[in-house]
Amino acid sequence: MAREVLLTGANRGIGLEFARQLAARGDRVVATCRNPAAASELAALDVQVETLDVVEAASIERIAALYEDRNLDLLINNAGVGVGHRPLGKLDYEEMGIFYATNAVGPLRLIEALLPALRRGEYPTVVSLTSRVGSIQDNTSGGSYAYRASKAALNAITKSLAIDLAEEGFTCVVLHPGWVQTDMGGASAPLPTDQSVAGMLRVLEGLSQEDSGGFFDYTGESLPW
């Protein structure tokens, strides 16, 4: 059955591949990015392209207005920034604020704005792309303060959403896409983008409400918080 999907950060990398595979499956996709005019590959897909900057309240309000009378089954929070490697003694706290605003506060603001549309959806699902780097238990190398903290915050937000929305039938999870061959992941990354996204879509297909509040990778492995 075709789903109503909203996808953020869809102009390149993982987001673009999500848009491509979701459209190919027959889902009705609203794919967003900050500058659609520069997203020629996205424009070529069978998706509805809209402007969205997750750090701008007015931009989120415009997307929410788009869904005033529409249902939403699946929200994929893919837009994000990273990875920062500034060491202690050279941290940029303005940059850290940008990371937090983009990777944690922005997704939460968007989720809250779209709750009415999600509540009208069938089996409403909220998926936010995180990173294994956001795991506190799995942190054995230190560093990456801005990125780690922002993704750990996103993880905590998702866990709270899963609890608060459980009685309404929501499924809220975070997914680690793996080390992927994107601009962010770099040329030495071992995982092709299409394999990562195909894996995450398989994980999504297998989710149940019992999985809500979970932290999984693209293979379905449960990851430590």
Image: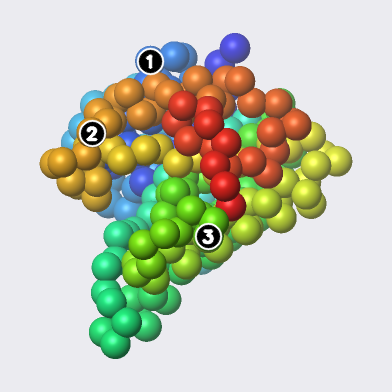
Residue type at the position of mark 1:
Ala
Which residue shows up at 58% across the image and 60% down it?
109
At mark 3, the secondary structure is loop
Residue 100 placement (x, y as % from top left): 46, 68
Residue type at the position of mark 2:
Pro
Residue type at the position of mark 3:
Ile
* Residue marked by disc 2: 190
Comes first in the chain, label 3 or label 2: 3
Which one is nearer the viewer's eye here, 144 or 48? 144
Comes first in the chain, label 3 or label 1: 1
* Residue marked by disc 3: 136
- Vertical comparison of 139 with 166: above or below: below
Residue at mark 3 to residue at mark 1: CA–CA distance: 36 Å
Is residue 52 something one can see in this rendering? no
Residue 179 placement (x, y as % from top left): 31, 40
Classify mark 2: residues with Cα within 10 Å, few (<14), some (14-19) or many (20+): few
Comes first in the chain, label 1 or label 2: 1
Which residue shows up at 42% across the image and 59% down it?
140
Picture quadrant of residue 44: top left
* Residue marked by disc 1: 24
Residue at mark 1 to residue at mark 2: CA–CA distance: 25 Å
Tell me, what colour scheme is on the image? rainbow
